[in-house]
Image (cartoon, rainbow, N blue to C red):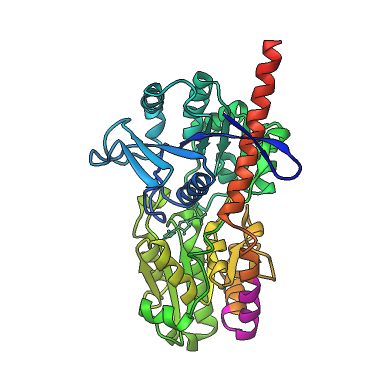
Amino acid sequence: MTISLRGSRRTQTIWPRRVAVLSVHTSPLEQPGTGDAGGMNVYITHTAVEMARRGVAVEVFTRATSSEQPPVAELAPGVLVRHIPAGPFEPLGRDELPAQLCAFTSGVLRAEAFHEPGYYDLIHSHYWLSGQVGWLARDRWGVPLVHTAHTLAKVKNAALAEGDKPEPRTRVIGEEQVVAESDRLVANTPVEARQLVDLYGAAPERVHTVAPGVDLNRFVPGSQAGARRRLGLPRDAVVLAFAGRIQPLKAPDVLLHAAAHLLQRQPELRERLVVLVVGGPSGTGLEQPQALRELAVSLGIQEVVRFLPPQPGERLAEVYRAADVVAVPSYNESFGLVALEAQACGTPVVAAEVGGLPVAVAHGVSGLLVPSHAARDWAGALASVALRPDRRAELAENALVHARRFSWARTTDALLETYAAASRTLAALHEEIAV
Ligand code: UDP
């Protein structure tokens, strides 16, 4: 552990030399927007790269899902991904993963045992499955455990889409254990921080709120006409876009219902309206991968809706630029990176007023928040932005300003402060014990 004196206040900041990041169920090397890969992967990748830039080495441990994966891969200079064999070399459902945690933990402990003692200074676990592993490794290595939940079962279950399957009790119990065991908990927003305290009994002083970021080099404004040309969309279209993992919780069906409602109200729009849905099936959405296409047919809007498979970042930026509005209709969202990325491209967002979205979107300034999931309300909100060029232009300008308040560099600086606080507390505890 290095101790450096930073800044004019000469506060003692303890930065780790090397962090073990645990990401059991999904790898930062995967393409986000389908299956288990989403915002968490993007978060881990960007914060790891920023840490490495600051001289903090990062090693991400994830479960090996193919025998072709090398044991260790370099994600970026200073950032390694370690593929830990645990169970079959194939993707497993989240309900199957708890049974592999023992094998995974053993793999993590073995990897560490190849090094001199004290190789990792801190563990940062992401999602409750990783928290279970981190808790044991923390005890073995005598280092702090920082945990980010990303989503919480109790919160998800309180806001389920109609007919969607609730998160199992095993997860709730597992999360409660991880909350109790972590030295620090990182929440995306003050709302999540409250949920950790109120629903999971977290000690408030251990919860740090750290806003996620956005890649301000990749997600930049550009020509809407150019983006539409490259995506094969008509120049004069009215484009509403959704991007993310296709599952009931993300509610892309709300956008389709709203589009159908809009066309009922304004049939002349049918020639121009395009609803872009970008992403692949995920979670409970895997049970009915065709459900959204079938819904488009049953609503009679199949020629209006275009489906695109998960897109890499550069291409996704084109989607955001091509859109008049990006819709984020989720039933719950601990933050909503898509909302921030769209705004960074200068596109206003219409989002559900849930979870972290009121932080990601400034209501009436950079977009609109809708307090319901009713088609009529969504149709009204989307039309009030997409069909009013002056209003849209004003929101678009503010969206850029709003998004620029967030960056992965800022997120990483705040995470390092959290790491330092966790290390200070542990060091003080060790001193107390020594006395
Ligand atoms: N994403 C992507 N390609 C796609 C769809 C989504 O790369 O086709 C990325 C998107 O850029 C964002 C992430 O997936 O960073 C989704 O994050 P968000 O917080 O919106 O949702 P989550 O997946 O965490 O539920």
The location of residue 141, given as percent across then percent down, is 50, 21
The location of residue 188, given as percent across then percent down, is 62, 48
On screen, residue 68 versus residue 302, left or right, reads left
On screen, residue 122 versus residue 233, left or right, reads right
Q: Is residue 88 magenta?
A: no
In this rendering, the answer to whether 249 lies above or below 366 is above
Q: Quadrant of the C terminus?
A: top right
Task: Pick the residue in front: 113 or 400.
Answer: 113
- Is residue 179 visible in this depiction of the protein? yes
The residue drawn where x is 56% and y is 79% is 386
Task: Pick the residue in front: 366 or 115.
Answer: 115
Quick one: which residue is furthest to the left in this view? 68
Which stretch did the figure color magenta?
A: 386-398
The residue drawn where x is 30% and y is 40% is 65
In this rendering, the answer to whether 39 lies above or below 63 is below
Q: Quadrant of the N terminus?
A: top right
The location of residue 401, given as percent across then percent down, is 65, 69
In this rendering, the answer to whether 151 lies above or below 145 is below
On screen, residue 311 versus residue 320, left or right, reads left
- Is residue 23 visible in this depiction of the protein? no
